[in-house]
Image: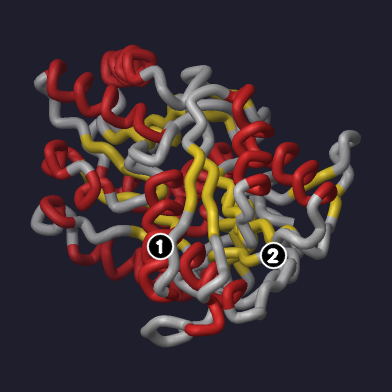
């Protein structure tokens, strides 16, 4: 990963990388308004989760919220298949096809092959897949007319979170870990590490990140997205090493992180991912510094509404800071604890990323 700065958005910052070309992507879905759609009366949208399930308080739940909102707006029912194991993906997608779904939303990188295979076998059914593109068996890119990738350049928002963490830490050590080493996971970690590095560059600090080496692309992973005890153990180790801000990119495993913090009795904060954890899991509200959000519900809703109206497009949607597909959640309980000058700096950096004056790149940046 490299970060390129073309102008001194904060004054006097140095070049430390080369500009990477960002892939062209479709614009944010446009708002279609509200109300039922008579022409959609025979439209049947469906959704398939990964094994995290629809109550994961993360991307499955956000996607489910999106199809729920779309169905309400359209005045139609929807069907769902909740996966509990990886070997259910193909059969769950097939079951949605067999039940007459016109549109199927699959959630997560792990469903890419199941989505591809079903789409190739059923060209009259439209698909969208959250957090992944599709590829051939040799991993070469594949484009299908009936599959829309829904992707997020979360490195941009995670960069802001890294800068915030570096400006907030008291110990000078922040940490991160992932569930599994998927591109949709490591892109958060890449941006976070680069944001910390940028703060060090600008402020002369020496904040370190434990849990992810962006150059080597190696780090700490729980091995799943459902083993909350693994998240707790990893977090205990991070806390014991002096980490006082943790970014868990592991779905519901952040709950294990919260448990570890509460057990430690130490002043440690969490940066959430995907959703605003302060809103989705308020029982740990006092621990959340912020969250790196992907506006999956909004994108899923609009893509489904568009498909119902005959406006389905296979062009990838890529959420960015510019189209508000990714963003930082409010500071909530930490608002009074964070220096207002730091907040202003983050706003300036955000504007510089949007304008292209700062380019944040990752090996996992949507292509």
Of 3 and 8, the residue lying toward us:
3
The numbered disc on residue 316 is 2
Could you say where residue 83 lies in the image, as x and y percent from the top left? 51, 31
Q: Please give the name of the residue rendered at 21% of the width and 56% of the height, measured from the top-left corner.
A: 331
Q: In which quarter of the image is residue 128?
A: bottom right
Disc 1 on helix, strand or loop?
A: strand
In this image, 134 relative to 213: left or right? Answer: right
In this image, 269 relative to 247: left or right? Answer: left
Location of residue 51 with respect to 363 vertically, above or below: above
Of 156 and 119, the residue lying toward us:
119
The numbered disc on residue 224 is none
Location of residue 114 with respect to 35 vertically, above or below: above
Q: Please give the name of the residue rendered at 24% of the width and 47% of the height, measured from the top-left corner.
A: 280
Disc 2 on helix, strand or loop?
A: loop
Q: Please give the name of the residue rendered at 72% of the width and 59% of the height, measured from the top-left corner.
A: 125
Could you say where residue 97 lies in the image, as x and y percent from the top left? 67, 48
Q: Taking the image as drawn, is residue 8 in sight?
A: no
The numbered disc on residue 327 is 1
């Amino acid at each position: 990963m490299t970060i390129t700065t073309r102008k001194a958005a904060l004054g006097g910052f140095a070049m430390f990388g080369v500009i990477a070309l960002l892939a062209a992507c479709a614009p944010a879905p446009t708002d279609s308004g509200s109300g039922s759609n008579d022409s959609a009366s025979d439209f049947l949208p469906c959704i398939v989760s990964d094994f995290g399930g629809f109550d994961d308080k993360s991307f499955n739940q956000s996607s489910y919220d999106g199809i729920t909102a779309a169905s309400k707006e359209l005045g139609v029912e929807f069907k769902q298949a909740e996966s509990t194991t990886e070997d259910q993906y193909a059969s769950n997608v097939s079951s949605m096809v067999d039940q007459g779904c016109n549109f199927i939303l699959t959630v997560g990188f792990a469903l890419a092959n199941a989505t591809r295979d079903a789409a190739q076998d059923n060209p009259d059914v439209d698909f969208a897949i959250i957090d992944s593109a599709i590829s051939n068996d040799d991993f070469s890119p594949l484009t299908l007319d009936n599959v829309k990738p829904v992707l997020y350049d979360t490195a941009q928002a995670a960069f802001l979170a890294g800068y915030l963490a570096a400006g907030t830490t008291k110990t000078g050590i922040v940490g991160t870990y992932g569930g599994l080493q998927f591109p949709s996971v490591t892109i958060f970690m890449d941006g976070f590490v680069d944001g910390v590095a940028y703060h060090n560059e600008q402020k002369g600090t020496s904040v370190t990140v434990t849990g992810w080496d962006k150059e080597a692309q190696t780090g700490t992973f729980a091995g799943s997205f459902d083993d909350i005890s693994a998240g707790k153990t990893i977090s205990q180790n991070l806390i014991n090493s002096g980490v006082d801000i943790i970014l868990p990119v592991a779905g519901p495993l952040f709950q294990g992180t919260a448990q570890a913090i509460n057990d430690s009795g130490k002043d440690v904060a969490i940066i959430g991912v995907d959703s605003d954890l302060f809103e989705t899991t308020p029982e740990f509200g006092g621990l959340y510094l912020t969250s790196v959000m992907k506006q999956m519900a909004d994108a899923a809703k609009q893509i489904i509404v568009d498909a119902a109206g005959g406006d389905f497009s296979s062009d990838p949607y890529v959420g960015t800071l510019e189209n508000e597909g990714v963003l930082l959640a409010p500071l909530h309980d930490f608002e009074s604890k964070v220096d207002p000058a730091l907040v202003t700096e983050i706003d300036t950096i955000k504007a510089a990323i949007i304008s292209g004056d700062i380019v944040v790149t990752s090996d996992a940046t949507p292509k």
